């Protein structure tokens, strides 16, 4: 029997499947079987698989598309009868030494439950955009429970790349998979990683041996951002686990913070719905209009952020509607958090835009009399500058919700 079972789940994604398969089959470590698990595709992919005359390949076809809940995920896990297991995805691809290096790491210590690595973020054409987390100078080994504690403290800024995570099957078999029903789709992957760390050690290799693809099509991004509230809800599921291994005061503060972020996300989702209706949902047209301008200015954020900024800029254009000037009014702290690139893009795509910095409420009140309500549109943060926003609103200036301009792009 071979050492590793690699399971690649796929659904209606012909354009990337061949690249994903080739990257797996061309690994420098070859002692594995590859199960291609077709999750009910409605388009033909068998011709792509037929190109590979490789005895390591096994093909499973589901009759219908399954949601990633406990029943389906348990079947995926139980398909592994080898010593090691890796579950990966059809639109991503590997560097050729991924399995070799992860096998070397996991076999050094029998108490290691899983090994993963950093990932490059690439666009649909394979162009490198960023890394999943900051590049590390050395491999990181988390002792049992240490990753759980680190999740809240973030003393070490690393993650486990799910599609590159090599798991020792003896630990996987101990895992109670019922928790997957608590999450939407695979938003519980970090919780899954913490549950593995509850069983044993976890290692993260310093290299980026995995390539994670993000998309340019607006509809995919909107679908992802629609689940933003669910992400914070998913994080809250982890609180009871964190309480077992982390200080009570830290857990209380973390839970409160996540609840506030979830509530903000719910409000933002409602605002976004209004914004999308205002611009008729023509995201691809908007992206095409601004793409060259954005990239000429070196804007290299991932596609989620690019679509987000375009939605907001287009919405702001509809609000400004002929006004000569418009300002962002906020605190110095907020100004610094936005980043230079964001301000450059606003300036380029919103003619007449100016960035006014008001450090304190008193300074804002002293300066507001210089603004004409007829000619200027004021956008004030309701987050770090709440008092300012309320006072400006009382004076008759337009004050927008924080989400509309607070991009958080660096």
Image (cartoon, rainbow, N blue to C red):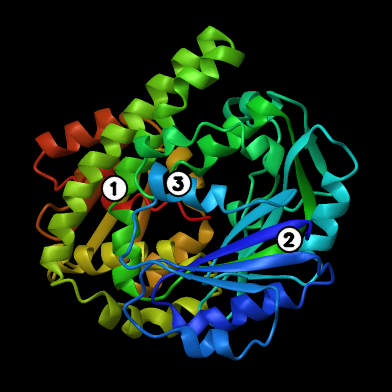
* Residue 274 in the figure: left or right of residue 9: left
Where 35 sits versus 364, above or below? below
Q: Secondary structure at mark 1?
A: helix
Indicate the position of residue 286 as horizontal and vertical percent values. Answer: 28, 78
Counting from the top left corner in percent of width and height, residue 215 is at 44, 72
Cα separation between marks 2 and 3: 32 Å
Q: Is residue 55 above or below residue 194?
A: below
Q: State the residue position of label 2.
A: 208
**Rendered residue at 61%/55% (across/down):** 132
Residue at the far top: name it: 248
Closest to the observer: 113 or 266? 113
Is residue 214 visible in the rendered structure shown here?
A: yes
- What secondary structure is marked by label 2? strand
* Label 2 crowd bin: few (<14), some (14–19), many (20+), radius 10 Å: many
Give the quadrant of residue 242: top right
CA distance separating discs 3 and 1: 14 Å
Whether residue 358 appears in this view of the structure is: no
Q: x, y percentage for residue 402?
A: 28, 44
Q: Residue at x 29, y 70 (%)?
A: 219
For disc 1, the marked residue is 403
- Residue 277, percent across and down? 11, 64
- Specify the farthest residue to the right: 108
- Residue 335, which numbered label? 3
Q: What is the number of the mark on residue 286? A: none
Report if the CB atoms under discs 1 and 2 are less than 8 Å apart.
no
Q: Nearer the viewer, mark 3 or mark 1?
A: 1
Looking at the rendered image, the disc whose residue lies closer to the viewer, 2 or 3, is 2
């Amino acid at each position: 029997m071979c050492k590793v079972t690699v399971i690649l789940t796929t659904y209606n994604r012909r354009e990337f499947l061949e690249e994903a398969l080739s990257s797996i089959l061309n690994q420098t470590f070859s002692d594995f079987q590859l199960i291609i698990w077709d999750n009910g595709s409605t388009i033909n992919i068998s011709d792509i698989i037929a190109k590979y005359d490789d005895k390591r390949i096994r093909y499973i076809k589901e009759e219908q598309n399954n949601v990633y809940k406990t029943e389906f995920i348990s079947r995926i896990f139980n398909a592994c009868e080898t010593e090691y297991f890796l579950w990966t995805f059809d639109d991503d691809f590997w560097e050729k030494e991924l399995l070799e290096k992860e096998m070397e790491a996991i076999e050094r210590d029998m108490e290691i439950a899983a090994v993963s690595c950093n990932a490059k973020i690439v666009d649909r054409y394979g162009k490198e955009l960023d890394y999943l987390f900051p590049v590390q100078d050395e491999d990181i080994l988390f002792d049992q429970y240490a990753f759980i504690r680190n999740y809240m403290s973030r003393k070490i800024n690393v993650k486990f790349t799910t599609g590159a995570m090599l798991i020792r099957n003896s630990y996987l078999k101990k895992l109670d998979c019922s928790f997957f029903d608590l999450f939407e789709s695979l938003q519980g992957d970090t919780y899954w990683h913490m549950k593995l760390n509850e069983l044993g050690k976890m290692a993260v290799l310093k290299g980026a041996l995995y390539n994670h693809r993000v998309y340019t099509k607006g509809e995919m991004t909107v679908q992802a951002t629609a689940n933003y509230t669910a992400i914070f809800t998913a994080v809250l599921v982890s609180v009871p686990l964190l309480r077992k291994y982390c200080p009570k005061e830290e857990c209380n503060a973390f839970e409160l913070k996540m609840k506030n972020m979830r509530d903000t996300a719910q409000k933002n989702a409602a605002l976004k719905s209004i914004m999308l209706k205002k611009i008729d949902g023509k995201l691809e047209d908007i992206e095409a209009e601004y793409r060259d301008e954005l990239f000429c200015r070196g804007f290299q954020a991932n596609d989620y952020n690019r679509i987000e900024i375009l939605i907001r800029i287009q919405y702001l254009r509809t609000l400004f509607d002929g006004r000569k000037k418009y300002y962002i009014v906020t605190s110095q702290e907020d100004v610094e958090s936005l980043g230079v690139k964001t301000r450059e893009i606003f300036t380029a795509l919103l003619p007449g835009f100016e960035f006014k910095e008001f450090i304190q409420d008193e300074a804002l009140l002293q300066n507001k009399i210089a603004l004409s309500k007829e000619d200027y549109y004021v956008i004030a943060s309701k987050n770090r500058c709440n008092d300012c926003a309320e006072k400006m609103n009382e004076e008759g200036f337009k004050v927008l919700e924080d989400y509309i301009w607070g991009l958080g792009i660096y």
